[in-house]
Image: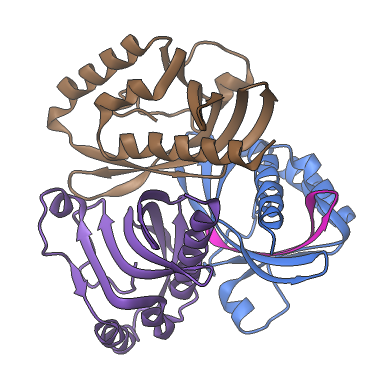
Chain colours: A brown, B purple, C blue
Amino acid sequence: MTSSVLQYIIEAQAKYARCIDDDRLEEWPSLFHGPCLYRITTASNYRDGLEAGIVFANSRGMLTDRVSALREANIYERQTYRHILGQPSILSEDGAKVRSETSFLVARILQDGDTSIYATGRYFDVYEIADRSAQLQERTVVCDSSRIDTLLALPL
Amino acid sequence: MTSSVLQYIIEAQAKYARCIDDDRLEEWPSLFHGPCLYRITTASNYRDGLEAGIVFANSRGMLTDRVSALREANIYERQTYRHILGQPSILSEDGAKVRSETSFLVARILQDGDTSIYATGRYFDVYEIADRSAQLQERTVVCDSSRIDTLLALPL
Amino acid sequence: MTSSVLQYIIEAQAKYARCIDDDRLEEWPSLFHGPCLYRITTASNYRDGLEAGIVFANSRGMLTDRVSALREANIYERQTYRHILGQPSILSEDGAKVRSETSFLVARILQDGDTSIYATGRYFDVYEIADRSAQLQERTVVCDSSRIDTLLALPL
């Protein structure tokens, strides 16, 4: 592995986190490249090899629809996120395709200022390294807790 | 951008965080170079372009005064912080002057051991790269929550 | 310092955190090399130079015993950890031996899904750099809080 691959992934993940935390949700689908796969599941489901998760989307259109729904539904409950990410571990490299695992903690800040841990877990990502950047193709979000707010108001 | 610039900033930020978390507040003002600007504001004020914030200091003397006040006021309420920082994103480079954005989470540990999230947000920093290090010139702390403890017992 | 030393330490720390967070505790002792020293203490004890801590182990055998005890004791209370680490600061380099300090936050996820901050603090580590990797020889975990769950169900 070249250290630049790791750096590209770190930059892509920081850009992703800032997109959500800055409430620029409409840009979120464009952060996925190629076929696009995004899903959220729990650690116990993931361990048991269960496909069924909390969220499943395999096209940018589905992500866009999700953002639209969130915008309509969340008028009455303003909240923001703050992503804190660990350093990614490279799991495998196959040509330009790189798989990584990254720990995350997301804090949620409610309208009244109350701040709490919203979710912790791991990102299992697939990137295509091209043009001196890491292009996200797949993200599987594995939440540590099995008690995830089913509304999942914002993307993880 | 050279990767060393990023590394210099990471080192400067770690040094800053350790200074606070190790309770060496008297060294804190010396971490600022040049004109020195330090302020704390909320995300909503920052979004609206409001200058007025929670804390404003544009000289090392003001920072020193702040530390003195904290030392006198906080005898009765011991607490410590723990900063957890994300990787900085470089926003712009203009010669030796570099602007970066970094997510943070600060946990607060009270005397009785109780630990909670004290603040989350972003650092908007301006550094001068010189002598193989990043010298902090300006730090704007943008807190996600609008409900910040007005005492702000320790610097962020 | 070469940047690769820092990268080796980051990788070793990520591997360590994943071992715990993935509940592969039986592999944990093998992450220590050479004489092996592992201890957990509080910030106040550490500041006062007290040797006595919460946990003390100076052999892999003691770590293995600890894991066995945890496996027997914790049948009734399932929980997982999520480590979020800051970037390590290199404190000193003496040949292949490197000392570092790293801030951590560990979230605990209980069986019912409840997530909270379990511990924050610093790792003081000693590594031997060999074979393009950082081999952990000593880890002193200094917890910020003096009120640590004495069961300390999982390693930090």
The dominant secondary structure in magenta is strand
Query: Which residue appears at 56% of the width and 36% of the height?
Result: A102
Q: Nearer the viewer, residue C16 or C67?
A: C16
Vertical arrangement, residue B136 with respect to residue C105, above or below: below
Residue A37 visible in the displayed image: yes
Percent of width and height locating residue A2: 67, 38
Give the quadrant of residue A32: top left
Magenta span has B93? no
B126, B39: nearer the viewer: B126
Residue B146 vertical placement versus C124 (above, below): above
Region rendered in magenta: C119-139
Say which quarter of the image contains residue C48. bottom right
Q: Residue at x 58, y 58 (%)?
A: C149
Asked if residue A143 shows in the view, the reply is no
Query: Total marks drawn?
Result: 0
Query: Is C7 positioned to the left or the right of B52 in the image?
Result: right
Asked if residue C128 is among those painted magenta in the image, a careful observer would answer: yes
Image coordinates of residue B125 in percent, x first then y, are 33, 61
* Residue C20 horizontal/vertical position (percent): 68, 43
Q: Residue at x 40, y 59 (%)?
A: B106
| Quadrant showing the N terminus of chain C | bottom right
The residue depicted at 25 percent of the width and 81 percent of the height is B59
- On the picture, is A76 further left or further right than C21? left
- Vertical relation: C59 (above or below) A152: below
